[in-house]
Every structure is written in C-alpha cells, then in structure tokens.
Image (tube, rainbow, N blue to C red):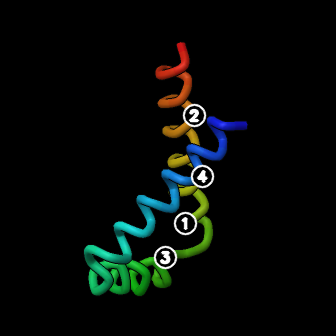
C-alpha cells in the first residue's frame, strides 16, 4: 500500500510541475489533443500504460 501511495504522490508532483512550469504550453497541448480522434487518444493512453508496466516490471525484477 505504501508503494501505491508513493506512486500516486509522484503522479501529483509530476502533474503539478507541468502546471507550474509551463501552463501556456500545457494549454496548447490540450488544444492540440482535442483535434485528435478518440481512437488515437486511446492508443496513446494504452501505449503509455504498457510502457509504465514494462518499466515497473524492469525495476521490480
């Protein structure tokens, strides 16, 4: 459970850094994402999930 809460905390830190460091760039990226079809956004999300799983698997091995 501690690992899970640590991961959630890191997610908040990373997302907060993105918002704090470059809010204009983040707004521009979000505008660009709205132009993508939903299938492409899902594909990007699934690739991100797979990369995260592989990374965790490598670290935990």
Image position of 52 with respect to 57: above or below: below
Residue plotted at (48% across, 20% down) = 58
Mark 1 residue element: helix
**Labelled pair 1, 3 in contact (Cβ < 8 Å):** yes
Instruction: Looking at the picture, tell me which residue is in the foreground, 41 or 2.
Output: 2
Q: CA distance from mark 2 to mark 3?
A: 25 Å
Q: Which residue is mark 1?
A: 41
Does label 2 or label 3 sit earlier along the sequence?
3
Q: CA distance from mark 1 to mark 2?
A: 18 Å
Q: Looking at the image, is mark 3 or mark 4 nearer the viewer?
A: 4
Cα separation between marks 1 and 3? 7 Å
Kindly indicate the quadrant of the structure image that contains residue 2: top right
Residue at (44, 60) in percent of width and height:
13
* Left or right relative to 32: residue 58: right
Q: Which mark is residue 8?
A: 4
Image position, residue 38 (x, y; %)? 61, 72
- Asked if the residue at tag 2 contacts the one at tag 4, i.e. Cβ–Cβ closer than 8 Å, the answer is no
Q: Which residue is mark 3?
A: 36
Q: Earlier in the sequence, mark 4 or mark 2?
A: 4
Name the residue tied to disc 2.
Answer: 53
- Pointer 3 or 4: first along the chain: 4
């Amino acid at each position: 459970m501690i690992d899970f809460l640590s991961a959630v905390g890191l997610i908040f830190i990373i997302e907060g850094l993105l918002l704090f460091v470059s809010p204009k760039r983040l707004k521009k990226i979000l505008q660009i994402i709205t132009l993508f079809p939903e299938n492409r956004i899902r594909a990007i999300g699934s690739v991100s999930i797979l990369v995260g799983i592989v990374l965790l698997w490598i670290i935990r091995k």
